[in-house]
């Protein structure tokens, strides 16, 4: 049964000409926000609500300051809109690399999860890395 499932997943990935992503497997993607190798917090999306919360490590340390948009360390923040801190990680569609991707994957134009996964790892705006937590 497991072999059949793996074969099916591989066939679906080939059919789309893209590897399977966490988003395709899990409908509630979770990103990790890191500073160097330290996990600062988690960004989740359930299909309609974005949520962000700090890691236990970050909540219990005093060296790094809280992010401006998320000042309370032990709060779970929720919003129907992606916060500017994360939204700014998605490059402008005017950039050739982004335009090329969207031309070949037009259905991803408004898929912020996919765009964050592909292009939001680093930002010129801050030293944090955003990676999909698989």
Image (cartoon, rainbow, N blue to C red):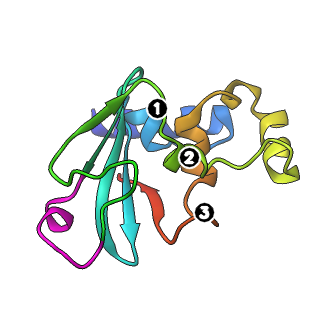
Find residue 100 and report its image quarter. Answer: top right
> What residue is at 45 percent from the left and 57 percent from the top?
131
- If you read the primary sequence from the N terminus, does the residue marked by circle 2 or circle 3 appear first? 2
Q: Residue furthest top?
A: 48
Crowd band around label 1 with a 10 angstrom C-alpha radius: few (<14), some (14–19), many (20+): few
* Alpha-carbon span between mark 1 and mark 2: 26 Å
Q: Magenta stretch? A: 54-64
Q: Give the x, y percent position of residue 133.
A: 35, 53
* Residue picked out by circle 3: 123
Q: How many marks?
A: 3
Mark number displayed over residue 116: 2
Q: Position of residue 76 (x, y in %)?
A: 22, 40
Which of the pair 18/34 is nearer the observer?
34
Depth check: give the residue in front, 26 or 68.
Answer: 68
Is any part of residue 48 visible from this angle?
A: yes
Which numbered disc flags the more N-terminal residue, 3 or 1? 1
Mark 3 Cα shell of 10 Å, populated few (<14), some (14-19), many (≥20): some
């Amino acid at each position: 049964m497991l072999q059949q499932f793996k074969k099916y997943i591989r066939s679906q990935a080939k059919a789309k000409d893209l590897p399977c992503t966490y988003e395709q497997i899990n409908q509630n993607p979770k990103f990790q926000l890191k500073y160097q190798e330290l996990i600062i917090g988690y960004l989740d999306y359930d299909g309609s609500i974005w949520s962000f919360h700090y890691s236990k490590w970050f909540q219990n340390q005093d060296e790094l300051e809280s992010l401006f948009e998320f000042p309370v360390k032990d709060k779970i923040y929720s919003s129907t809109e992606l916060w500017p801190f994360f939204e700014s990680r998605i490059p402008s569609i005017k950039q050739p690399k982004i335009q090329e991707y969207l031309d070949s994957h037009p259905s991803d134009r408004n898929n912020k999860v996919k765009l964050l996964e592909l292009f939001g790892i680093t930002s010129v705006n801050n030293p944090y890395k955003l990676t999909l937590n698989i």
